[in-house]
Amino acid sequence: MSATEVVTASPTTVAEVDGISSSSKPRPTRALHHIPRPESLEAQRQWQLEQMAGAFRIFAKLGFADGGSGHISLRDPINPNTFWINPYGFHFGLLSVSDMVHVDKNGNRIGGNNARINKAGFIIHSAIHAARPDINAACHMHSPYARAWSTFGKPIDMLNQDSCMFYDDLSVYAAFGGVVFAPEEGRNIAEALGPRNKNIILQNHGILTCGGTIAEAAAFFIALERACQTQLLVESATIPSSVGGAVSQLSKTFVTEEEAEYTKKGTGSPDVMYMQFVPEYQMILKETKGDFLV
């Protein structure tokens, strides 16, 4: 059996997949990958805002905070033509639910924190939300390895199982127009993302990842940052160089297209990416005692 296969227990299995002790009687089990969406739109808004604040805390812990740069946006479940975004000039490690700013499609504040927002962030995220109704969340940070790999304006190779999360799901915006202060640049980025992909490398800039939930977008971001790090390590290891008089003969071995497609289905779906985020969220909840939930 391939390591990428998703296994769920059948209704006749006596041990549940979440670790609950076995019983003498068969009982149904919960799916291994499941997004537990609240029923009401109001509860969905609160749930996603909590995960948005949690994502910022996780990103700060991972070293993605960079002054006033970086933003996460969340389409409002109640009024889908509006979205939430982080305030400008607040450290990711200090953000809480009440800090998020609710804006309309023109960037006017309509709720949440009474604070300024990043103009470039609004332009990028508003264009993506307008062009892609399926995208409810988007993350863009100036993380170190993604920023370095973006210099080349190239996608990542299918080098391993984790790289395959991005098989046929990664665009490249091969242009750089400076800090995004013009709406055209936001529309250009949204156009480069395309009608289906959720991830994009912005040349000379960094990366942007999207999803149907905050968890999916955030998990994609963490995974793509690490994929860029792996790519840089592999590139440096395969450059021919003289070491002690010997010439390195290392070469890349790529995952085949068929295997990459299959692996993507088992590692890069919305449900799986949600579950990639859950352990990080659980840990940040424990470390902060949930102080970002207010």
Image (cartoon, rainbow, N blue to C red):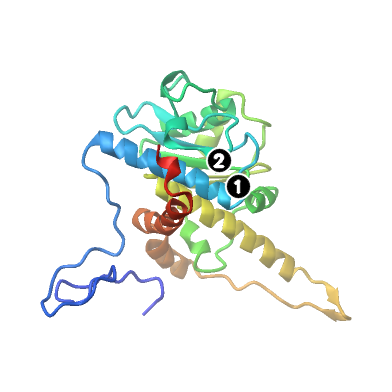
Where does residue 2 sit, x and y in percent of width and height? Answer: 39, 77
Tag 1: amino acid: Phe
> Which numbered disc flags the more N-terminal residue, 1 or 2?
1
Q: The residue tagged with tag 1: helix, strand or loop?
A: loop
Would you name the residue on which mark 2 appears? 92
Q: Which residue is drawn at 67% across and 32% down?
A: 177
Task: Pick out the residue farthest to the left.
Answer: 25
Where does residue 110 sit, x and y in percent of width and height? Answer: 40, 19
Q: Closer to the observer: label 1 or label 2?
A: 2
Tag 2: amino acid: Phe
- Give 71 or 198, whichever is nearer the viewer: 71
Q: Which residue is drawn at 22% across and 63% down?
A: 30
Left or right: 208, with 52 as reference point: right
- Give 196 or 70, whichever is nearer the viewer: 70
Q: Does the rendering let one see residue 52?
A: no
Where does residue 52 sit, x and y in percent of width and height? Answer: 43, 41
Crowding at label 1, few (<14), some or many (≥20) Cα neighbours within 10 Å?
A: many
- Give 294 or 74, whichever is nearer the viewer: 294
Mark 1 → mark 2, Cα distance in angstroms:
9 Å
Image mark for residue 64? 1
Q: Which residue is drawn at 47% across and 46% down?
A: 55
Q: Residue at x 54, y 39 (%)?
A: 94
From this view, report whether residue 197 is shown above or below residue 268.
above
Left or right: 207, with 212 as reference point: right
Q: Look at the image and tell me in which quarter the C terminus lies.
A: top left
